[in-house]
Structure formats: structure tokens, C-alpha cells
Image (cartoon, rainbow, N blue to C red):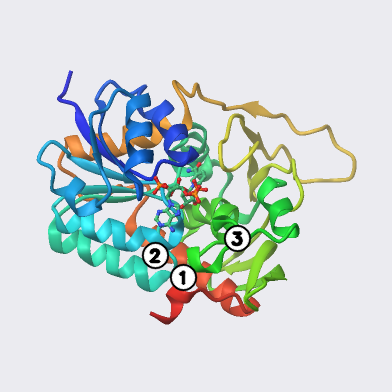
Amino acid sequence: MKRKIRFGFVGTGRISDWVLKGAFLDPRFKLEAVCSRSKERADAFAARYGVKKTFTDIKEMASCPTVDAIYIGTPNATHKDLAIKAMNCGKAVLCEKPMASNAAEVREMTAAAKANGVLLMEAMISTLNPNFKEAVRFIDEIAPIRHWSSAFCQYSARYEKLLAGEVTNVFNPAMAGGAIMDIGVYTIYPMVRLFGKPESLTASMRTIPLPDGSLTDVSGSIQFSYPGMHASVIYSKTDDSFLPTEIAGEKGNILLDQIHITRKAEYIPHAAPASGRGLPPERQDITCSMDGDEYQCEFREFIDLLTYGKKESAINTLQTSLTVMEIIDEARRQNGITYPADKL
Ligand SMILES: NC(=O)c1ccc[n+]([C@@H]2O[C@H](COP(=O)([O-])OP(=O)(O)OC[C@H]3O[C@@H](n4cnc5c(N)ncnc54)[C@H](OP(=O)(O)O)[C@@H]3O)[C@@H](O)[C@H]2O)c1
């Protein structure tokens, strides 16, 4: 077995617990240190995992010689500063989605990764899921592609809090929060991974005014134009949707049951030119074994890259992170959603 990669985790919220469950499935993963804004929370989190090293300063944790890589599981607006501090200490960074508050911050992070010669990857699970990877293998079978359509709508307890007057981080502009950043990103990122930057987009968001006079977005839909194809996405934190994601081509279709964590993938070859009521199309199940969970897939990719001295994922590329952020910036601009980070 190759040597273990020793991780320092920043943030002691539920996402850190979720990803650890998957990360520990990789025998090369070791949780070495924990960093929190509070010493007590760092100690309590670390104790649950039998970890001794705790910090309240990212620079101190990233300077620790037994830490190889940093995972950032804190609110969006904090990603850039934490990541750059860690990279300036020479450490590889796995940063939660979305990569940053806006495209300008992604450019700064990318520049820091290149200047320090370290690995930086956005922790976007959708594109690293084996079912998504399998679907990508079928793209040529159904080409030319004419439509991407994706939905991620999940009723959120934090929406109820918002209606009751409590602005949690997920909806807080100061934390670069909002529905497009929290879950819309899952419908956009895989689209960009497959088709690159769209020529144009029209975004419609439902927004809610906050007590300080700013706006937050709770749901939305976006229409994209690409050469020879269209794309449409919907996302929401105010209602559920069970619509699959569909890639439609002239020679067939691919269906993914849910885009954030795809558990079932189907390939539907186009049988014959439609002529009224033909036979129902034949669906081929192309689902793969997950071999662990979605976070294990993410850590497998990141640890593989580190092990082989790579500075960037060929799947979750820095260009994809940048293009996604440019799309979200434009969607926010069209709907009057701004963050304090936009003005820095
Ligand atoms: N990949 C996924 O499946 C997934 C799922 C959910 C969320 N996420 C992403 O994970 C990140 C965290 O989301 P979340 O909902 O877990 O956020 P959260 O609960 O608001 O915060 C997570 C942790 O970050 C630290 N934190 C909170 N506010 C902070 C601040 N103002 N400055 C610095 N640190 C702060 C806290 O840890 P300490 O108190 O220890 O400092 C907190 O427990 C976001 O980028 C989100 O998009 C990813």
C-alpha cells in the first residue's frame, strides 16, 4: 500500500463528518489535524476521530510538517482566504463546492496554486461519481447532443428558518450563500464539464429580501445556448423535484436519476425515426457499482493526484471551476444578487 496522505480538516460542521465517512474508506487517507474557529470545537471534533492535533489558525495547521493536504469545509465566502493561506504554506487543497464567492476569487486561488506548485481541486462530487463517468462514455453513442436538462430541488429546513427570520449561512450573502451556490451549482458543473462554456444564458431566480435590505435567492431556472444545442436547469431549496437529469442526442438519450449523487444511469438508444406511436424505447441500465460512497470517489481522485504528483484533476479542472463561477456571477447579475465579496 502507498503511504498515507495526512489531511488537516478546516471546519467542524456536518459536511466534515459526511466527507470523513467516505474518506476513511480509502486506506490511504489519514485525518491528522483539525482546525476550527473555536479550540473547544476543534478538540471535540478531533476527539471523536481519535486525532490529537488541533488548531484555531489555518496557517499554523498548514505549516505543520505532518500535514500533507487541507480539506476546506467552511462557508463559501471563506474558501478563498483559507485555501490561499494553505497553498502559500505549500499544501495541497481540496476545497468544498462552489470553489469561491465569485470568478475573481477563483482566479486568485488558481494563481496561488500555480505560484506554489500545489494541487487545488474543487470538491464537486457529481462529476467524480462512477455513474456520471460511465454516462460520459456513452456520449459519442448518442451524439450530436441537442439538450442537457438537469434538476436539483430539495426542500430545506434552512428555508423554513429563513421564513421565520433566521438567516443561516446557506442563505447569507455575507457568506456567498443562496440556492444557486448551494445546489444550483450541481446542475451547472457537470454541464460545463461536458460542454464547456455556453454562448449565452438567461437566469430567472426567486429572491427574498433580507432584514438588512439585501436579497437572497431560494430557487431558480437557467436557459443556456450552446452551438447546436440548448441546456436548461432548475434548482430549488423551497420544493422537491424527482426529475432525472437527461442528456439528449440525435442518436439516443442518457438518464441520470439525480445529478448530485447519481445512483442509477440509463442509456436509451434511439430505435428508429419517430413515426407516431412506436414501441417504447429500450432502456439499458448502465449503473456502476459505487464501491463506497460519493465522498470516497472524491478523495480517491484527490489522493491519486497527490500520490502521482499531479497539480490538477483532469476531471474537476480549475477551468471548469472558473467557468462555473462565471456562469453563476452572470446569473446573479441578471437577478440583482450581490455579495460583499463582489466589492472587494
Ligand atoms: N459536498 C457536499 O455534499 C456538500 C454538502 C453540504 C455543504 N457543502 C459545502 O460545504 C461548505 C460548508 O457548508 P455547511 O452547510 O456545512 O456550512 P456551515 O454549517 O455554515 O459551516 C461549516 C463549518 O464552517 C465553520 N464556519 C462557519 N461559519 C464560519 C465563518 N463565518 N468563518 C469561518 N468558518 C466558519 C464552522 O466550523 P467551526 O465552528 O469549527 O469553525 C462550521 O461548522 C459550503 O461550501 C457548502 O457549499 C458541500
User: Residues under labels 1 and 2: Cα distance?
Assistant: 6 Å
Check the image and name the residue furthest to the bottom: 343
Residue beneath the point at 43% across and 26% down: 21
Q: Secondary structure at mark 1?
A: helix
Q: Position of residue 278 (x, y in %)?
A: 85, 37
Q: On the image, numbered disc 3 is attached to which residue?
A: 171
User: Residues under labels 1 and 3: Cα distance?
Assistant: 20 Å
Q: Secondary structure at mark 2?
A: helix
Residue beneath the point at 65% across and 71% down: 203
Residue beneath the point at 20% across and 55% down: 87
- The answer to whether residue 105 of the structure is visible from this angle is yes
| Quarter of the rendering occupied by the C terminus | bottom left
Q: Can you tell which of label 1 and label 3 is closer to the viewer?
A: 3
Q: On the image, numbered disc 2 is attached to which residue?
A: 322
The reply to whether callout 1 and callout 2 are in contact (CB within 8 Å) is yes
Q: Secondary structure at mark 3?
A: helix
Within-10-Å neighbours for mark 2: few <14, some 14–19, many 20+ = many
Lower sequence index among marks 2 and 3? 3
Q: Position of residue 33 (x, y in %)?
A: 25, 36
Q: Which of the 4 quarters of the picture holds residue 99?
A: bottom left
Closer to the camera, 80 or 214? 214
Residue beneath the point at 53% across and 54% down: 191
Within-10-Å neighbours for mark 1: few <14, some 14–19, many 20+ = some
Check the image and name the residue furthest to the top: 1
Identify the disc placed on residue 326. 1
Q: Amino acid at mark 3?
A: Phe
Closer to the camera, 135 or 261? 261
Q: Is residue 194 above or below residue 142?
A: below
Q: Amino acid at mark 1?
A: Glu
Q: Amino acid at mark 2?
A: Leu
Identify the disc placed on residue 69. none
